[in-house]
Image (tube, rainbow, N blue to C red):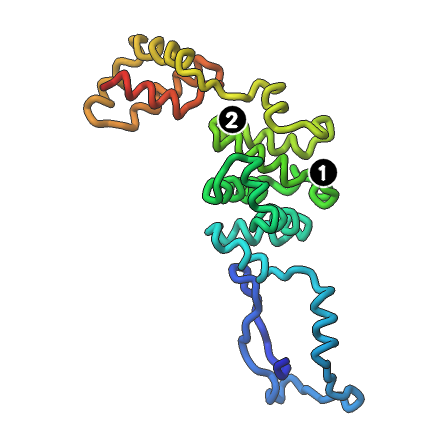
Amino acid sequence: GERVVQETRGWSDDKGITTSQRSKEDAQDYRYMPDPDIPPIVLTDEEIARVQQDVPTMPGEYRAQWQSLALDNSVVNTVLNHQPLAVLLSDIYPLKHNAASVLQSLGVDESVYERLVKRIFNWFASTPEELMDMSKVESGFVGPRRLLLLSQLVEDNKVSSTGAKELFLDLFDEQYTGKMPEAIAEAKNLLQVSDEGAIGAIVDEVMNDPASAASIADIKAGKDKAIGYLVGQVMKRSRGKANPALAQKLIRERLK
């Protein structure tokens, strides 16, 4: 308990706090007049503790919990604009008493888990609000398990980042109620091909195509960005299903 003073305070969007700007206590222009009918309000420690038990988690507490994720301030601010979303993500991170079982069920360690979580934060922050039904978040329709499994599909290169954004919105769609992300991805033909033999055959086709000769020459001359054309051609011939990281690896192997 500190003494409350008359002052103008400003709001900081970045920090999520108010800061003192100027005191008004002695400024006659404001014509402040104390109200004699309002006595000093004294709260006991017990009363303060009782009120604190009913107060929901405050923005500063969420920020402290998520600090180790090194999220951009704009991402955190977007999440904190929606209380149900903040509650959902605080259930996902940080890990609590069930940490060992969660990590074991996903087959990841803590560092990989943090990457999964960070990806989920960024999906929520980068998706236009009108495309997300926050009532589905509040009701638990969009829950931690499916979000983590979707993020893991990206981590394991089973779906592309573009495909994952589409699947993220599908988690809000009632036609996919109860369906796991991988099943949805399979139904929508969004699973990437990571078979070296299949992708290698497409890579050979692309590299034997006369249209690729200039890009191959550029790469050999040190212009590494030219590999983007070859990867793009592999993706085009595979109708977007090839794992681009694997395609690039196979291209580089053939250029040695």
Residue 15 spot, x, y in % from top left:
52, 62
In the picture, residue 54 is in which quadrant?
bottom right
Horizontal side of 146 relative to 50 (left or right) equals left
Query: Which mark, residue 31?
Result: none
Q: On the rendered image, what quadrant is the C terminus found in?
A: top left
In the picture, residue 9 is in which quadrant?
bottom right
Q: Name the residue under label 1.
A: 141
Identify which amino acid the numbered label 1 is placed on.
Answer: Phe
Residue 99 spot, x, y in % from top left:
57, 46
Identify which amino acid the numbered label 2 is placed on.
Answer: Val
Q: Mark 2 points at which residue?
A: 159
Compared with 187, 82 (above or below) is below
Q: Can residue 149 be seen in this view?
A: yes
Decide: few, some or many residues near mark 2? Use Cα within 10 Å; few <14, some 14-19, many ≥20. many
Say which of 244 and 155 sits in front: 155
Q: Residue at x 64, y 81 (%)?
A: 4
Q: Residue at x 63, y 37 (%)?
A: 145
Say which of 141 and 6 sits in front: 141
Horizontal side of 203 relative to 91 (left or right) equals left
Say which of 104 and 157 sits in front: 104
| Element at label 1 | loop
Decide: few, some or many residues near mark 1? Use Cα within 10 Å; few <14, some 14-19, many ≥20. some
| Element at label 2 | loop
Horizontal side of 174 relative to 21 (left or right) equals right
First in residue order: circle 1 vs circle 2: 1
Horizontal side of 138 relative to 210 (left or right) equals right
